[in-house]
């Protein structure tokens, strides 16, 4: 799953970002919570396709009993065995993510990190993770069987820093003054708890992907 990423320099300057990114994971390991309902093939409202599979299932499928595992292989399995592999496809360009599901006060979230993408004409979602950072998204299962994925957005978080409403280590850099959180996981998780339970209007209404299942059984 290791891949070398070659990114045209010009693309970095031309692309803007609106998803909050972090150097560290948003989830503590004791909050990881796998949900089978996310597994499947989905179409979103932004004309993107999501192929979501269990990391453990794919690992066992590709790893033969006779395979000699390295220490790094074993650590990788332990770290991600309760997560997903997401293949996000848009305009025929693919991007692969490791997505770790975790709970915040009973709500399901995903921590996403890209590990491979096609660098020619990057698709929008992958382009927002150029430095293999983490992002956080809230998962909402709909009564009609669909799923809404709502990313933590800079549009809602930046003003909290401006108004001194939160204290998290962060940097703002690049031509777009992008926000990068540098706090440790424990602090990020506590922030998510407070943000999720706050009365900030439309706090999850910015980067929303509305998914409908393509392989649903009749």
Image (cartoon, helix red, strand yellow):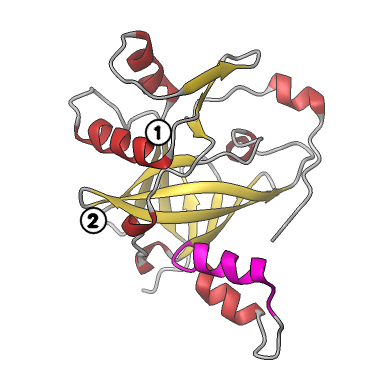
Q: Residue furthest top?
A: 163
| Looking at the image, residue 39 lies above or below residue 124 | below
**Residue in the foreground of this view, choosing between 67 and 3:** 67
| Looking at the image, residue 20 lies above or below residue 64 | above
Whichever of callouts 1 and 2 sits on the residue coming sooner in the sequence is 2
- Give the x, y percent position of residue 128: 59, 33
- Give the x, y percent position of residue 75: 58, 66
Mark 1 lies on residue: 152
Query: Is residue 71 covered in magenta?
Result: yes
- Asked whether, in this view, residue 139 is left or right of residue 46, the answer is left
Q: Please tell me how crowded label 2 is: few (under 14), some (14-19), or many (20+) other residues with Cα within 10 Å.
A: few
Q: Secondary structure at mark 2?
A: loop
- For the question of whether residue 94 can be seen, the reply is no
In which quadrant of the rendered image does the N terminus lie? bottom right
- Give the x, y percent position of residue 2: 72, 57
Query: Is residue 72 covered in magenta?
Result: yes
Tell me what residue is drawn at x 20 percent, y 48 percent: 105
| Looking at the image, residue 124 lies above or below residue 113 | above
**Residue in the foreground of this view, choosing between 131 and 199:** 131
Q: Residue furthest front?
A: 71
- Highlighted magenta segment, given as a residue range: 69-83
- Marks 1 and 2 sit apart, C-alpha to C-alpha, by 23 Å
Q: Looking at the rendering, which quadrant does residue 194 occupy?
A: top left
Tell me what residue is drawn at x 54 percent, y 44 percent: 47
> Disc 1 or disc 2, which is closer to the eye?
1
Tell me what residue is drawn at x 57 percent, y 14 percent: 177
Q: Please tell me how crowded label 1 is: few (under 14), some (14-19), or many (20+) other residues with Cα within 10 Å.
A: many
- For the question of whether residue 77 can be seen, the reply is yes
- Say the numbered circle drawn on residue 143: 2
- Give the x, y percent position of residue 95: 65, 49
Q: Secondary structure at mark 1?
A: loop
In which quadrant of the rendered image does the C terminus lie? bottom left
């Amino acid at each position: 799953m290791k891949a070398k990423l070659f990114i045209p320099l010009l693309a970095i300057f031309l692309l803007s970002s609106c998803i909050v990114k972090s150097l560290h994971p948003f989830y503590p390991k004791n909050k990881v919570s796998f949900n089978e309902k996310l597994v499947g093939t989905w179409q979103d409202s932004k004309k993107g396709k999501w192929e979501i599979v269990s990391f453990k299932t794919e690992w066992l499928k590709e790893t033969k009993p006779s395979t000699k595992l390295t220490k790094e292989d074993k650590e990788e399995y332990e770290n991600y065995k309760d997560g997903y592999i997401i293949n996000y496809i848009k305009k025929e360009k693919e991007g692969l993510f490791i997505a770790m599901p975790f709970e915040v006060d009973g709500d399901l979230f995903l921590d996403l990190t890209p590990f491979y993408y096609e660098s020619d004409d990057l698709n929008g979602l992958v382009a927002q993770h150029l430095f293999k950072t983490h992002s956080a998204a809230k998962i909402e299962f709909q009564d009609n069987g669909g799923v809404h994925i709502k990313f933590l957005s800079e549009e809602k978080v930046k003003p909290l820093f401006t108004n001194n409403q939160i204290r998290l280590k962060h940097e703002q850099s690049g031509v777009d003054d992008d926000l990068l959180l540098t706090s440790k996981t424990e602090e990020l998780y506590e922030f998510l708890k407070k943000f999720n339970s706050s009365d900030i209007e439309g706090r999850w209404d910015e980067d929303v992907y509305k998914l409908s299942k393509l392989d649903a059984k009749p």
